Image (spheres, rainbow, N blue to C red):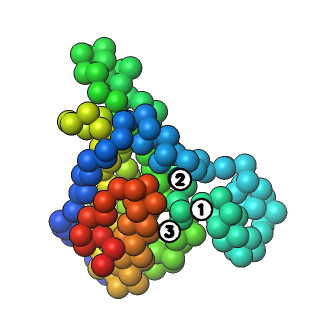
Amino acid sequence: MERGWVERGYQARRLDLSIDRSFDDFRRQYEQAVPAYDAAAFNALVARNAPWDDVLALMRDRAPHDFLIYWSSGDLQPMMNLAGDSRHCVEYLMGNHTTAERMFRHDPAAMLYAPLRTLISDGPDGGARFLIEQPSHAFGSLGMDAIHEVGLELDREVAALLAYLEVPVPAGLSD
């Protein structure tokens, strides 16, 4: 096989949702529903070479709505305020490494889109705003049915999280 590069385009579907709560209230609710990744707990499993079932059990215990926050930017407002921009904005990497593994086994390139990137900011109407790209579009771009199926499952999990947070679920996300 000749070495080189392959270009594969895809069309993303960004979900930009208006939230009828304040930035602070919605951020608090989101971070309670999607708790922070506990690196020490998961690293302890690696240290003792635990069976995968232990990883699955810990994820079920720690991620009540199927996702953990692996990283957060913190509120960007203090820095952006130096330029006169007063809006609040927090970026997150949200995911589930046991779900990601089900794609990784087929192609490590799936990690380009996992974990999922989300954003909470002040909305234009005084409420909050939540943004995420629809997982199935990104994962489907890899051209493997097995990975795309997990992307569709992630769509449904994002839809369930939004429903739990009492946010209207966009059409086409939970179908």
In the image, 153: left or right of 143? Answer: right
Looking at the image, tell me whether mark 1 or mark 3 is earlier in sequence order. 1
Residue at 55%, 47% (x, y): give it: 32
- Above or below 28: residue 135: below
Residue at 42%, 42% (x, y): give it: 26
Labelled pair 2, 1 in contact (Cβ < 8 Å) = yes
- Residue 123 lies, in percent from the top left, at 25, 38
Count up the numbered dots.
3
Q: The residue under label 1 is which amino acid type?
A: Pro
Q: The residue under label 2 is which amino acid type?
A: Ala
Q: Dot 3 lies on which element?
A: helix
In the image, 175: left or right of 29? Answer: left
Q: Single out the residue that lies furthest toward the right.
A: 48
The answer to whether residue 3 of the structure is visible from this angle is no
- Residue 125 lies, in percent from the top left, at 21, 36
Q: Residues within 10 Å of mark 3 (few under 14, many from 20)?
A: many
Viewer-nearest residue: 124 or 120: 124
- Picture quarter with the C terminus: bottom left
Looking at the image, tell me whether mark 3 or mark 2 is earlier in sequence order. 2
Residue at 22%, 62% (x, y): give it: 13
Separation of marks 3 and 2 at Cα, in angstroms: 19 Å
Q: Which residue is mark 2?
A: 33
Q: Which residue is mark 1?
A: 64
In the image, 20: left or right of 72? Answer: left
Q: Which residue is mark 3?
A: 100
- Picture quarter with the N terminus: bottom left
Q: Residues within 10 Å of mark 1 (few under 14, many from 20)?
A: some
- Residue 132 lies, in percent from the top left, at 32, 55
Viewer-nearest residue: 157 or 103: 157
Q: Dot 1 lies on which element?
A: loop
Viewer-nearest residue: 103 or 99: 99
Separation of marks 2 and 1 at Cα, in angstroms: 7 Å
